[in-house]
């Protein structure tokens, strides 16, 4: 039953084709991609960042990044849209380049372009759990879309997988 | 169609009730919980670690942890079971305390207790993608099980959510 709640939540991603195409185009058109989120959302963001590197896309996680400049794209991730550090970063970045938020609720990120993940809140999945699960899979679908757009197959990108650890 | 492949993979978790119960009992019986994985598996592990902290369970991610001692439990995460650093860590830890691996394939982790996540590989989800998605959700189901065993509700654990960032 609990697994069904998770599956039903993830099924909601089937209506997000437009958002997946939109974000993949923004990534391809950006000079560089920066990603930011804190806590579990941050770690989901880092998972996405690693895969972008496998695709040879110039990507940084914001806490380990050079200066954000004109032409760069920042993707911020916050289920509530209220995480103060994320809101502050988004505000600063908006003065410089393009910012897209991946959220569940608008929160205080109303004045930037948002992609809303349709999460049905259930307390068996505490706090942002359902959002984080959807975000991981949403970003994986963006990766799949980027691979098609770049005409890359798994055997192409596997060459960029970490070979030291 | 791609989303269906993901959903079908996740559905396979419905046969893992025993493993979810097993791991949650091991966590409750351990003195402390240590988690290790590299790359995306590592970040999935960090997501699990954060949630364990919310449940007031003494948890560490191995790269930011004190010494592993008798009575402690180490959970290693590697889809292939072949990540060298993970295999090395698991071998060292086995001499000291208890080790459980969460994997897709045994790889070189055959001599420790393993929980295998049933992933149907598909190249549209490159490398460990399907494993990482299942691992995140598997660990979230372990959290749900732990909440029931500890009689904790969302409002109890939300008090332990980060309040500074």
Image (spheres, coloured by chain):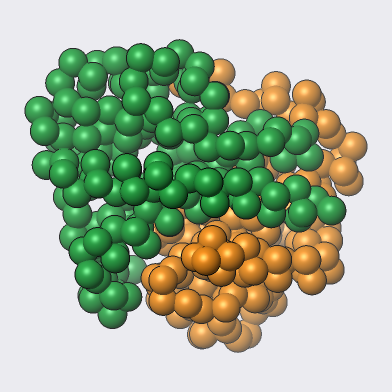
Chain colours: A green, B orange
Give x and y (percent) for residue B163.
56, 18
Front residue of this view, candidates B117 and B71:
B117
User: Quick check: A41 left or right of A26?
Assistant: right
* Count of picture labels: 0
Q: Is residue A8 visible?
A: yes
Give x and y (percent) for residue A63.
29, 34
User: Quick check: B120 left or right of B124?
Assistant: right
Identify the residue shown where x is 84% and y is 68%: B18
Residue A53 vs B81, above or below: the answer is above
Front residue of this view, candidates A68 and A99:
A99
Query: Picture quarter containing residue B85?
Result: bottom left
Residue B163 vs A116, above or below: the answer is above
Query: Picture quarter containing residue B118?
Result: bottom right
Identify the residue shown where x is 80% and y is 51%: A2
Classify the position of the C terminus of chain A by image quarter: bottom left
Residue A78 vs B8, above or below: the answer is above
Identify the residue shown where x is 48% and y is 45%: A16
User: Quick check: A160 left or right of B6?
Assistant: left
Query: Picture quarter containing residue B114?
Result: bottom right
Front residue of this view, candidates A135 and A44:
A135
Give x and y (percent) for residue B57.
72, 41
Give x and y (percent) for residue B49.
59, 46
Identify the residue shown where x is 18% and y is 16%: A95
User: Quick check: A5 left or right of A34?
Assistant: right
Residue A55 vs A125, above or below: the answer is below
Q: Is residue B89 visible?
A: no
């Amino acid at each position: 039953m609990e697994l069904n709640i998770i599956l039903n939540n993830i099924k909601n991603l089937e209506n997000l084709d437009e958002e997946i195409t939109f974000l993949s185009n923004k990534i391809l058109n950006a000079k560089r991609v920066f990603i930011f989120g804190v806590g579990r959302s941050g770690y989901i963001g880092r998972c996405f960042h690693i895969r972008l590197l496998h695709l040879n896309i110039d990507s940084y996680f914001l806490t380990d990044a050079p200066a954000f400049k004109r032409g760069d794209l920042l993707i911020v991730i916050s289920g509530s849209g209220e995480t103060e550090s994320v809101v502050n970063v988004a505000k600063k970045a908006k003065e410089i380049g393009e910012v897209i938020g991946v959220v569940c609720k608008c929160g205080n990120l109303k004045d930037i372009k948002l992609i809303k993940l349709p999460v049905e809140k259930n307390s068996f999945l505490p706090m942002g759990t359902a959002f984080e699960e959807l975000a991981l899979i949403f970003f994986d679908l963006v990766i799949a879309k980027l691979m098609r757009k770049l005409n890359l197959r798994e055997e192409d990108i596997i060459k960029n997988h970490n070979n030291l650890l």
